[in-house]
Image (cartoon, rainbow, N blue to C red):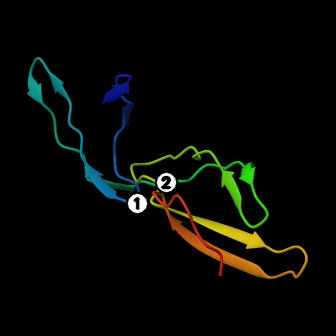
Amino acid sequence: QTVGTETELIITNLLSRTTYTMRVLALNAEGYGQVSQTASVTTVQFEIGQIAPPTLVARTATSITVAWTNPSVLGVYPIIDYVLTITNNATSAVSTVTLAKTVQQYELT
């Protein structure tokens, strides 16, 4: 998709962290002018937006169910994993778990 003015153009749907090169030339009733020199531009790395804290869905004597919402994502790469840090407040033991996006249950060991 392209949107812009006569001498400015917004080019969308590009890949993040990718270098693009471009040149421009003008056309009038007499024909084409000279081609500009090449310019190289690299897009920025996409950013993952702030994720809300996990919320309690259910609990038993030995388990809890938590949920969170997907963060806003800028760029073309989808979320593939989540990293959940769990701290036992009584013992200060910390567990870090990398969860595939499709994991529905995890047993803490």
Q: Which residue is mark 1?
A: 17
Q: Are marks 2 and 1 in contact (CB under 8 Å)?
A: yes
Structural crowding at the residue carrying mark 2, measured as other residues with C-alpha within 10 Å and reported as few (<14), some (14–19) or many (≥20): some
Under mark 2, the amino acid is Phe
Residue at 47% x, 55% y: name it: 79
Residue lying farthest front?
61
Q: Which residue is mark 2?
A: 46
Given residues 47 and 72, the one toward you in this image is 72
Q: Secondary structure at mark 2?
A: loop
Q: Secondary structure at mark 1?
A: loop
Residue at 76% x, 58% y: name it: 60
Structural crowding at the residue carrying mark 1, measured as other residues with C-alpha within 10 Å and reported as few (<14), some (14–19) or many (≥20): few
Q: Can I make out residue 6 in this image?
A: yes
Given residues 47 and 94, the one toward you in this image is 94
Q: Is residue 31 left or right of residue 34?
A: left
Under mark 1, the amino acid is Arg
Label 2 or label 1, whichever comes before in sequence order: 1
- Say which of marks 2 and 1 sits in front: 2
Percent position of residue 45, x then y: 48, 58
Residue at 39% x, 49% y: name it: 76
Q: Is residue 30 above or below residue 24?
A: above
Residue lying farthest left?
31
